[in-house]
């Protein structure tokens, strides 16, 4: 395991924020408004659209701010869905301020053309103000659109930034030329900004498109801030069942008692279950180890997903999140062999869902072996409360948490170890 810590150099450099007025608007593919959207209609495609304004992922700690302005259409076969989400302003922890932002996502059917589209727009960003000066950006937009017509799958991605302004100490604002997409702007020792990272993945039976307005890397802490992300995907491999869910080693939140802020621990590592399943193949990802300062050290973690369409109204899927070892309080509490498993089988008129395979090998507190009582909850005074096998039934599936740990030492952490969520819903075709 490797121990990581969050440096405070960047936080000390930030003293205030300057808002840059939003730049001129830019043309983008039209996303239907709620009033203009047609009534939902079935299609022969699995459709997905998602977008958000900001998402912070820690480098030296596995922390995240959570997605702001998040709008999402989960895997569906219905066209005519339209959702949006926006906020008036966002403070980025340790960075600066973002002005108003909005995300819109939709699924559309016009004639024989079926579309999934995501569009995000924000008005302006202040990144920092310090002894080095201040850096601000104008309006940022991103659009990801995928569609299918008589000629097959198609895509369109676009991201734009209105302008970048650097104001040196005691000097006049300087407009920095916008570089080509993918070419970074770097302030040595402080920030690296990459504009317009777009991606398209077109295959025989699916297409995926992603447009990201900005990627900001905070060099002292290796923290990444994703700004204005839009994503859309569609597939024609849905038989009769729509799958969704994910597996993760851990997720949680930690209260920073110094300033009463909540640090969200992202799903690490995480693997999503695709809409159409995995074709009967186990897909996985893993990480060697990570630390949450003042909370927990985690060894190797793994996330696996599986899904197969087994014919008319028959499908089977599972997700599994596992962790080899968890160490709290410098060895006060050690847990080994954590596995969460969520299994779902859909048959005509029947849904089977369970957590078979969820387990842990051992729990040791202060060198003494421990057992989870029949209540499913073990409390170690002054250290942690541990809940085993936390299950939640959801539409068409189940979410399973192998162990939920609530720290009792004042840190305020709630950490889920081994997370699995699986859904298999009937497709409307």
Image: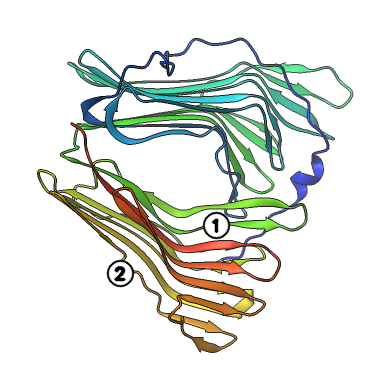
Q: Is residue 343 left or right of residue 33?
A: left
Q: Is residue 75 left or right of residue 213?
A: left
Numbered disc total: 2
Image spot of residue 252 (x, y percent) = 55, 57
Q: Earlier in the sequence, mark 2 or mark 1?
A: 1
Q: Residue furthest left?
A: 311
Residue drawn where x is 22% and y is 12% of the image: 111
Image spot of residue 104 (x, y percent) = 47, 24
As displayed, is residue 385 above or below residue 50?
below
Tell me the quarter of the picture where residue 359 sits.
bottom left
Q: Is any atom of residue 76 visible in this view?
A: yes
Marks 2 and 1, how far apart at CA: 22 Å
Quarter of the image that includes the C terminus? top left
Provide the residue designation for mark 1: 252
Assess disc 1: are there few (<14), some (14-19) or many (≥20) residues with their C-alpha within 10 Å of its C-alpha.
some
Camera-side residue of 420 and 147: 420
Q: Is residue 214 left or right of residue 16?
A: left
Residue drawn where x is 64% and y is 80% of the image: 381
- Dot 2 falls on a residue whose secondary structure is loop
Residue drawn where x is 52% and y is 73% of the image: 386
Camera-side residue of 6 and 412: 412
Assess disc 2: are there few (<14), some (14-19) or many (≥20) residues with their C-alpha within 10 Å of its C-alpha.
few
Residue drawn where x is 66% and y is 16% of the image: 22
């Amino acid at each position: 395991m490797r121990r990581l810590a969050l440096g405070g150099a960047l936080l000390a450099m930030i003293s205030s924020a300057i808002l840059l007025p939003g730049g001129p608007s830019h043309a983008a593919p039209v996303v239907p408004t709620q009033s203009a959207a047609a009534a939902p209609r079935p299609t022969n495609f699995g459709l997905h659209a998602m977008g958000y304004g900001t998402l912070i992922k820690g480098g030296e700690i596995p922390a995240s701010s959570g997605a702001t302005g998040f709008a999402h259409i989960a895997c569906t076969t219905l066209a005519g869905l339209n959702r949006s989400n926006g906020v008036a302003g966002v403070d980025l922890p340790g960075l600066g301020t973002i002005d108003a932002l909005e995300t819109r996502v939709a699924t559309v059917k016009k004639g024989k053309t079926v579309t999934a589209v995501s569009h995000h727009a924000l008005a302006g960003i202040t990144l920092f103000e310090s002894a080095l000066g201040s850096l601000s950006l104008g309006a940022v937009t991103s659009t990801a659109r995928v569609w299918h017509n008589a000629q097959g799958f198609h895509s369109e991605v676009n991201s734009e930034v209105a302008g970048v302004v650097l104001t040196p100490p005691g000097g006049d604002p300087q407009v920095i030329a916008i570089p080509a997409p993918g070419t970074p702007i770097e302030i040595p020792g402080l920030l690296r900004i990459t504009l317009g990272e777009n991606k398209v993945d077109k295959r025989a039976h699916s297409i995926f498109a992603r447009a990201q307005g900005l990627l900001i890397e905070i060099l002292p802490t290796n923290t990444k801030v994703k700004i204005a992300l839009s994503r859309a995907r569609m597939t024609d491999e849905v038989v009769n069942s729509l799958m969704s869910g994910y597996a993760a080693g851990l997720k949680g939140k930690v209260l920073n008692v110094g300033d009463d802020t909540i640090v969200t621990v992202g799903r690490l590592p995480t693997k999503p279950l695709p809409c159409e399943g995995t074709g009967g193949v186990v897909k996985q990802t893993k990480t060697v180890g990570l630390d949450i300062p003042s909370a927990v050290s985690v060894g190797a973690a793994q996330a696996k997903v599986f899904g197969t369409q087994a014919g008319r109204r028959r499908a089977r899927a599972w997700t599994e999140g596992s962790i080899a070892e968890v160490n709290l309080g410098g060895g006060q509490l050690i847990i080994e062999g954590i596995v969460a498993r969520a299994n779902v089988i859909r048959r005509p008129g029947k849904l089977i869902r369970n957590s078979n395979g969820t387990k842990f090998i051992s729990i040791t507190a202060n060198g003494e072996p421990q057992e989870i009582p029949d209540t499913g909850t073990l409390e170690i005074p002054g250290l942690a409360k541990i809940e085993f096998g936390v299950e939640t039934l959801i539409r068409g599936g189940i979410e399973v948490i192998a162990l939920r740990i609530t720290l009792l030492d004042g840190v305020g952490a709630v950490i889920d170890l081994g997370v699995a969520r699986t859904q298999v819903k009937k497709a409307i075709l």
